Amino acid sequence: VKFTGALNNREVAKIFAKSHFFAMASHFDTFGVVFIEALSAGLPIVGTKCGGPESFIGNQHGVLVDVGDIAQLSGALIKMAENYKNYDDEAIRRYVINSFSDQAVSNCVAKQYNAILSD
């Protein structure tokens, strides 16, 4: 584990390119853009069920644990360190493109507007 402090976008991309997985244990998070950034690099996730990540991180993308459960978190980190190669990095990247790219988000917003306007 290396604690880097603040990084710019280019530095983050370099770190992600050298990483095997990404972990973040938040007490609350409404979405978690950094999770999407890590997933876009093909990295599986270890995170917490803190209000946002459980809406878009499935078993094929990583592992989510209960907030504050240190034993569960440490177990997930160990398991991920031993099994990160079992995740399909290309499938993880495709998931991000299909769900969170500019085009995917634009289509979702347009669909919502059309539904509202058609009522």
Image (cartoon, rainbow, N blue to C red):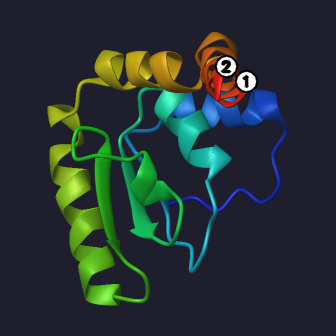
Please tell me the numbered disc located at residue 59.
none
State the residue at coordinates (70%, 37%).
12
Residue at image position (22%, 33%) is 87
| Residue 37 vertical placement versus 95 (above, below) | below
Label 1 Cα crowd, 10 Å radius (few <14 / some 14-19 / many 20+): few
Residue 49 locus on image (x, y percent): 41, 70
Query: Relative to residue 26, is residue 8 drawn left or right?
Result: right
Q: Is residue 52 left or right of residue 10?
A: left
Q: Quadrant of residue 101?
A: top right
Q: Nearer the viewer, residue 106 or 12?
A: 106
Query: Which residue is outermost to the front?
Result: 119
Write the residue at 55% across / 34% down. Answer: 16
Q: Which residue is mark 2?
A: 114
Residue 108 figure quarter: top right
Classify mark 2: helix, strand or loop: helix
Q: Quadrant of the C terminus?
A: top right
Name which residue type carries label 1. Answer: Leu
| Residue at x 47%, y 34% (from the top left corner) | 39
| SS category of the residue bearing label 1 | helix
Mark 2, Cα crowd under 10 Å, few <14 / some 14-19 / many 20+, is few
* Amino acid at the residue labelled 2: Asn
| Mark 2–mark 1 distance (CA, rounded to whole Å) | 5 Å
Residues marked 2 and 1 touching at CB (< 8 Å)? yes
Residue 46: quadrant of the picture = bottom left
Measured as percent of width and height from the top left, residue 84 is found at: 24, 41
Circle 1 residue: 117
Q: Nearer the viewer, residue 1 or 50?
A: 50
